[in-house]
Image (cartoon, rainbow, N blue to C red):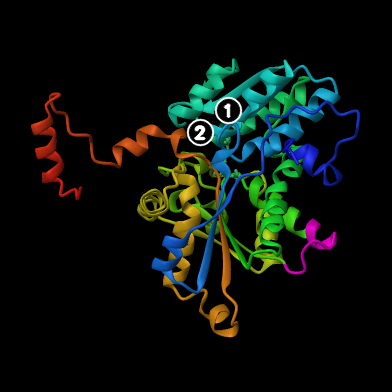
Amino acid sequence: MEWGGIINHYRDYLPVTEKTPVITLLEGNTPLIRAKNLSEELDPRIQIYLKYEGLNPTASFKDRGMTVAVSRALEKGTEAVICASTGNTSASAAAYAARAKISCIVLIPKDAIALGKLSQALVHGARVIAVDGNFDDALRLVREITSKYPITLVNSLNPDRIEGQKTAAFEICDVLGVAPHYQAMPVGNAGNITAYWKGYKEYQTGGKIQTLPKILGFQAAKSAPIVNGHLIRNPETIATAIRIGNPARWTEAVRAKKESRGLIEKIEDEEILKAYKLLADREGIFVEPASAISLAGIMKLHEKGYFESHLSNKNSKLIVVCILTGHGLKDPDLAISKSSSPVVLPPDEKKIMKAINQRSFTL
Ligand code: F0G
């Protein structure tokens, strides 16, 4: 069957009717890729799967929530949507609003979003306002604005966003035939962890799966309000997507952790970068740094022996899914700064072969 986007595919689970105008870019149906090389290196008893959400139309998971939020906004007669964003939400909102022929306003923290994301919001014709503050300031402002003006908020505070994003959990179960034992994911504003947990629970209620996964959420060490138990005024991390000090869905994230008997932990930037390079080197998968925290988290937990009790109790293999939320091309500056530069040479075969041999290539 031809893929028609998440609303068409999971209609029965979503807040839409035949009257809802479906604004879709055929998001969803992203690959669940076996990370064979990484599993072998880390622990062959653990089957690592990568849910490559960077392959959505605007290159992040936000499209799942945005198709529902924008379709429903249009149904209600909205003429404009607004969001605060560390980049991906703004890229997605701008694209879906363009398709719906409505206006889009985005508030981004000044100088703090990755270049690819900024280019997306601009090219799709959003009104982009760089706030001289951080994401939390921008979110506070859009909440104020939408309480006073008839503009629809499309941050994950909007329940339609959660509804759309939960479909990624459905897809994982549809492919595996069961729920994974563990699911690892980044936590920023905490909408996505809320969405996945809702999705798994609904699939269990609907009889599609018997068991639920343990949810493992990860925050960057200097942007870890949930782990630390208090707001962070000046969050910092190279993973700019999750540079958030006051998550809007904090309570729901803690609930997902507790109900699933999982955890939310913090990860250093160096560990994120190591996982970022490993995904690219060992599996050929290019993600943005925030997404690499899923693998970094699994590696850290494995090192601490976290999975041992599970592994010794069971004969079957452990299934761990890492959610890779955004594509690596979103943040080309970081990719280039963390890689070795190309060698510049004249167009001369001998010189080129000399350089290739020096770098010990086997031909
Ligand atoms: N990964 C990426 C690539 C993101 O862009 C985000 C959030 C997250 C993870 C965390 O998800 O907020 O639901 O906990 N990005 C938002 C944005 C904040 O504005 O694009 P979350």
Q: Indicate the amino acid at tag 1.
A: Ala
The foreground one among 77 and 43 is 43
Magenta region includes residue 122: no
The relative height of residue 80 versus residue 325 in the rendered view (above or below) is above
Q: Nearer the viewer, residue 229 or 186?
A: 186
Q: In what element is the residue under mark 2?
A: loop
Q: Is mark 1 within 8 Å of ligand 1?
A: yes
Task: Kindly give the residue lying farthest to the bottom in the view shown.
Answer: 313
x and y percentages locating residue 328 in the rendered image: 45, 39
For the point 80% across and 20% down, which residue is it? 78
* Percent of width and height locating residue 35: 48, 58
**Label 1 crowd (10 A; few <14 / some 14-19 / many >=20):** many
Q: Which mark is residue 134?
A: 2
Residue 84 in view in this figure = no
Residue 144 vs 198, above or below: the answer is above
Query: Magenta region's main secondary structure?
Result: loop
Q: Quadrant of the N terminus?
A: top right
Q: Is residue 44 above or below residue 176?
A: below
Mark 2: which amino acid?
A: Asn
Q: Earlier in the sequence, mark 1 or mark 2?
A: 1
Residue 91: image tag: 1
Report the magenta residues as a range. 202-211
Distance from the alpha carbon under mark 1 to that under mark 2: 18 Å
